[in-house]
Image (cartoon, grey):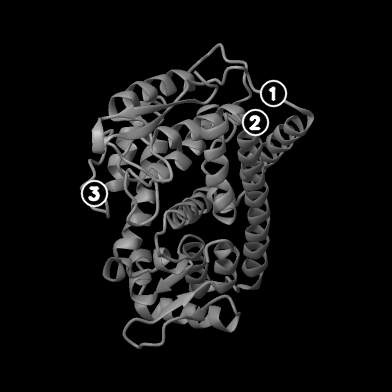
Amino acid sequence: MSRQGFIQNNLTGILMYQSFNPSPLPPVPALEINMSLQTTIINAHKNLSFLESLSDFIPNKDLFISLYVRKEALMSSQIEGTQATLEDILDPLIEENANQNVDEVMNYIKATHFAINRLETLPLCNRLIREIHAVLMDQARGQEKTPGAFRTSQNWIGGIGSTLKNARYIPPAPDVMVDAMSQLELYMHEAMSKEDPLIKASLIHYQFETIHPFLDGNGRIGRLLVVLYLMHMGLISTPVLYISYFLKRNRVEYYDRLMSVRQNGDYEQWVQFFITAIGDAAANATDIIKLITKLHETDASKIEIKGRSGAIRIALFEYLKKNPIIDIGKTAGILNITYNAVSGAVKYFIKLNILSQTANTKRNRTFSYTAYLDILRDGTE
């Protein structure tokens, strides 16, 4: 068997096709850690450590995490071709305006929150992966493709209209896939492993994408798996790392490097690339935390907080941190403040250039925390 695995013939005659069976992890022979890769690993650990320490000083950590999860969900879904924007998923009237693309992103958000909460009672394992998939695919496009269950039929990767005859890549057949996922689960929990957790995270992502255990949603689950593994290993305590930003910017290279391992057994180039992605994501998250913290401090200093009007302004400003696009009526109901009082605070924030009107119809006027959105929007367009 080659280092990466082997090609298997399936069926016979005109129905015959070839699938790829990956070798179990870790690679044999073992990874060659040269100076360049070692430097990449050290830098990524430094970036993750700094991000972890900085995240403890975010004024409202839960609100920040909530927005970060939404952004990662959006970009991870965009890699798969989902057509949605940051404004779509932050729309205060999302229940009325949602479409299939937005539903897919919202399901990813639900799946992320579900996974993090479930990790408290269930270790990172195939059962958890299947449960996350069920949430991801619930009532979304592809829901007919066995949500929450590993596939029992052959899948393949290729352009629109591709078949088993001309697919770019064909994962292992169903019976082989089940065994490969069991081996991957064992590798995730190999206590005797001396591999750096960033190397393991890179290899786990490669192996999962290569096995492709579901009929749909593999890319999104595979990227979420990286964050869950880093949390499982204690490198990060919250999901403030969105690796999809780097992978979206380098999408072609991302897919090409995955294929290079399958074709040539070159795990080293893949690990170098993916750990670079992790380090870049950590550095980017750190920059955004600094920008948002500075923006909030600057804007908070502008707000007059005396009297009842001041209390309403504070409540609205806190609300904006989690909901940077608002509708006055819905906001008034959630904050339990009168419509007129919220309207007055909104007008006050417009004068301070904190809010701006984004929809012009009188019936559904919405207002945006523009500077905040500009920071979050980076990479989502």
Residue named by callout 2: 268
Image depth: mark 3 or mark 1 in front: 1
Q: Is residue 294 above or below residue 212?
A: below
Instruction: Give x and y (percent) for residue 178.
Output: 32, 24
Mark 3–mark 1 distance (CA, rounded to whole Å) = 42 Å
Image depth: mark 2 or mark 3 in front: 2
Q: Label 3: how many residues lie within 10 Å, few (<14), some (14-19) or many (20+)?
A: some
Which three-letter amino acid code belongs to the residue tagged 3?
Gln
Horizontally, residue 132 falls left or right of residue 239, namely: left
Instruction: Give x and y (percent) for residue 202.
Output: 56, 33
Which three-letter amino acid code belongs to the residue tagged 1?
Glu
- Tell me the element at label 2: helix
Q: Nearer the viewer, residue 149 or 346?
A: 149
Mark 2–mark 3 distance (CA, rounded to whole Å) = 36 Å
On residue 32, which mark appears?
A: 1
- Is the C-beta separation of discs 2 and 3 under 8 Å? no
At x 63% / y 69%, what residue is drawn? 299
Residue named by callout 3: 143
Q: Label 2: how many residues lie within 10 Å, few (<14), some (14-19) or many (20+)?
A: some
Residue 81 shows up from this direction: yes
Q: Is residue 371 above or below residue 15?
A: below
- Is the C-beta separation of discs 1 and 2 under 8 Å? yes
Mark 1–mark 2 distance (CA, rounded to whole Å) = 7 Å
> N-terminal of the two: label 3 or label 1?
1
- Tell me the element at label 3: loop
Q: Is residue 16 above or below residue 311?
A: above
Instruction: Give x and y (percent) for residue 218.
Output: 38, 42
Residue 241 shows up from this direction: no
> N-terminal of the two: label 1 or label 2?
1
